[in-house]
Structure formats: structure tokens, C-alpha cells
Image (tube, coloured by chain):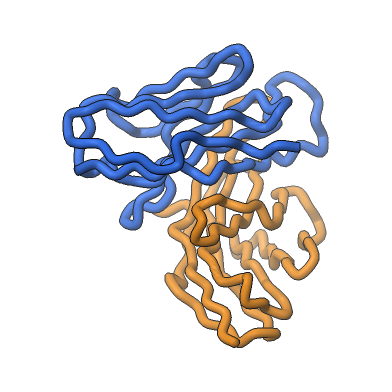
Chain colours: A blue, B orange
Amino acid sequence: KAGVTQTPRYLIKTRGQQVTLSCSPISGHRSVSWYQQTPGQGLQFLFEYFSETQRNKGNFPGRFSGRQFSNSRSEMNVSTLELGDSALYLCASSLAMAGQGAPTNTGELFFGEGSRLTVL
Amino acid sequence: AQKITQTQPGMFVQEKEAVTLDCTYDTSDPSYGLFWYKQPSSGEMIFLIYQGSYDQQNATEGRYSLNFQKARKSANLVISASQLGDSAMYFCAMREGLVLSGTYKYIFGTGTRLKVLA
């Protein structure tokens, strides 16, 4: 079973540019969430998508946005990049299925290897 | 206030010995889950072990066990017989809310960097 795939793995941008990151979840997983990881702040939750709808959102400015497609693949976009946006962006998928019985569903997150963004 | 606290920024352990990584949490939600993840230098977060708030027994997965003390709100990870490949960052995480309702969120601790010495 293929894992969570994130592209690109590494990228360098300059201030003011925008960036789009992609995440393909594990087949059958409908929930995709995004996290920003920095040495100073640790893992910070960005947002979560389920069936193409943003279901949960963290405390990030509107420059950070995302979407999910009908095949559960997700993209996140950061506009007007700032130096502080340099981070490892992690995508995670899970079997979370709202409204359906899943007694053994722990809601475990399956992570990709991340996209490391450097803003110069 | 921190909801997940990992007080050990770094730990050393001798190969083949056991090590305990501390994690305390804070929640008023009766239904929650506790997770431990390992992050090697490659960046990927690897799931290790899960403990549900209603689970009576401590979770175990191979060399990993979770010392769950609900009254003290602690969920320490115990790694037995440490191996060099265990050197990595370890994150404790909590899921608050119900998975089935969709109204849940994950909170991660700041991590503990474990170094296994040969």
C-alpha cells in the first residue's frame, strides 16, 4: 500500500512569491491535514480537509490556504511568502470517517516525508 | 497553557538499555487519544503507539510501550532494548474530540531528541 506522497520535497523561494505544495493521501483515506514544523514552534496545525471541505482550521493567516480534490489529493498554497514561512510542511492522511462506525479507528495520522520550504 | 508537555529536549541512552520519554497532557475532554510518533532525520513522522482515554490496559507495540497514568495525565513512552536506529525525534500527540464526529484536533508536543550510543 503506497504511503502519503508529498511534492516537491525541497524548494527555495524568495519573499513575496507564492508556493503550492501537493499531497496524495493513502488510498481510501478521505481526511488530509497539513502541519507546519519549525524548530522554534514545533508542529503547528494548519488545516484539515475531508471530502473536499475544510473541516478544521488552525491559527494561521489567510495567506495560507488549501483545497482538496474529489480524489482526496490536497494542495496547500502560501501567498506573499515571508522569511518566517521557511519550514517543513507535513501532510497527513487518516481514515477519519465522520458519521460512520469505525470502532477500531484510532484516527491515527499517516504522514508524508514533508516539503521543506526555504524562503530567501 | 501547553496541552502537551515534553520536558526532555534531549536524551541519551546506551544501546540495549531501556529509556523512558516523558509526556504529560492537559484536557477536559473525556474522549481523547494519545499517540507517539518518531521522526528520523528524513522528516517523515512514523506512528509508534496509541492509547485511548478509555483503554484499561497500557498499550504495547513490540519494543514500545506506553505507560498511561490517567489520573496524573501522563503518557510516557518506554523503549526497551534501544537500538542505534532509534535515534530520532519523538513526539507525543493528543487527539481531542471524537473521530466519528469530525470535530477533533491534534496537538503535538515539542519533541524529545533521543540519541542512542553504541
- Can residue A20 be seen here? The reply is yes
Quadrant of residue B32 within the rendered picture: top right
Q: Residue at x 17, y 35 (%)?
A: A15
The spot of residue B43 in percent (x, y) is 50, 53
The spot of residue A106 in percent (x, y) is 72, 41
The spot of residue B59 in percent (x, y) is 77, 60
Quadrant of residue A118 within the rendered picture: top left
Q: Which residue is drawn at 61% across and 37% down?
A: A4
The correct choice, above or below, for A81 with respect to A30 in the image is below
Judging depth in this view, the residue of A76 and B62 nearest the camera is: A76
Q: Residue at x 47, y 18 (%)?
A: A67
Quadrant of residue B68 within the rendered picture: bottom right
Q: Which residue is drawn at 64% across and 61% down?
A: B71
- Can residue B98 be seen here? The reply is no
Judging depth in this view, the residue of B82 and B70 nearest the camera is: B82
- Total of numbered circles in the picture? 0
Quarter of the C terminus of chain B within the rendering: bottom right
Q: Which residue lies furthest to the top in this view?
A: A70
The correct choice, above or below, for A113 with respect to B21 in the image is above
Judging depth in this view, the residue of A48 and B75 nearest the camera is: A48
